[in-house]
Amino acid sequence: MRRANLALETLDIAPPRPGMGPVSGGLWESGADTLSGRIVRQICAALFADELTPGERLGTEASLSQRFGVSRMAIRDSLRSLAAAGILDIRVGQRGGIFVASGNPERLAETLAIQIKLIGVDIEEILDAQIAIEVTAAGLAARNANPADIAGLKEEITAMEREIDAPDAFTRASLGFHESIVAASRNRVLIAQFKALRHILTPLYSRRTTTTIALRALASHRALVACIEARDPDAARDLMRRRLETVRAGHLAAAGQDHAKD
């Protein structure tokens, strides 16, 4: 029997004890006192316990109802929540059924970006997060980037040079360069986080991009690629930190001026 089926057969739908569960809040607590809520919570717990893996077939609505000992309505409600969260795939047809979903970095980035906006994170928090992510990524890129990565970064710099007097186009290209640096780190958690931040950073950066700022950014980008090509993680981290701290100071000063005008 498949491991997914064995894992599900051991799940208990009894009410949760205080403090139980991998996290609190969100999907795990939503409807937790209902049968469907408990099923959602325990399937998530099984996933985090490595009892379920992406792509595994869990069965059908009918078989899951029988296995959990609950009505098909309760199963249907829980599957709807899990599918909406991107945890399960519900497929129809001869080879259909309920499957553990595969990861989707783009969906994760978009969802995270939206939630960051909805909770009202301010500019300072965003820029601090950018520094934390990109400084770490720059050091890892200096260790992990391959020749194709470095060649690609150089091509992106060449493309940015053509957009020096086009603020919006330059901003998009420059943030694309930053995303490529993070991608060269080979750390998928950092990559997903930066993809989310990029959605928020693009309009923020576009408002302040000028030819002078673009020229400074290009000089920094060239120096960073040189550090990565030289396999010097310390230099790459230091350069990225200094550049982003300068950018942070400029954005916060501008935001302060805008606030004073209001």
Image (cartoon, rainbow, N blue to C red):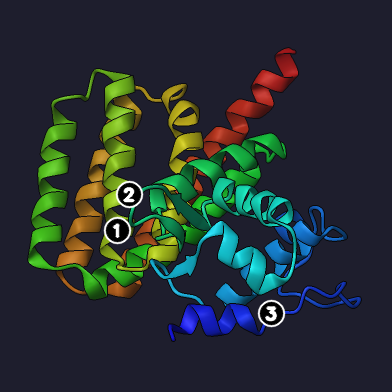
Mark 3 against mark 1, which lies toward the viewer?
A: 3
Q: Which mark is residue 17?
A: none
Q: Quadrant of the C terminus?
A: top right
Give me the residue at 25% from left, 62% from top.
184
Q: Is residue 140 above or below residue 196?
A: below
Q: Is the C-beta separation of discs 1 and 2 under 8 Å?
A: yes
Displayed quadrant of residue 36? bottom right
Residue 85 appearing in the image: yes
The type of residue carrying mark 2 is Glu
Tell whether 25 sits left or right of 245. Answer: right
Residue under label 1:
183
Disc 1 element: helix
Q: Residues within 10 Å of mark 1 (few under 14, many from 20)?
A: many
Residue flagged by tag 1: what amino acid is it? Ala
Q: Quadrant of residue 142?
A: bottom left
The tag earlier along the polypeptide, 2 or 3, is 3
- Helix, strand or loop at disc 3? loop
Q: Is residue 24 above or below residue 168?
A: below
Residue 100 position in % (x across, y down): 47, 64
Disc assigned to residue 179: 2
Query: Spatial distance from mark 3 to mark 1, Cα to Cα?
Result: 38 Å
Question: Counting other residues with Cα less than 10 Å from the Cα at mark 2, is it few (<14), some (14-19), or many (20 or more)?
Answer: many
Query: Disc 2, disc 3: CB below 8 Å?
Result: no
Crowding near pointer 3: few (<14 within 10 Å), some, many (20+)?
some
Nearer the camera: disc 2 or disc 3: 3
Amino acid residing under circle 3 = Leu
Count of marks, rendered view: 3
Reading the image, the residue beneath label 3 is: 11
Q: Is residue 51 visible?
A: no
Residue 41 percent coordinates (x, y): 71, 66
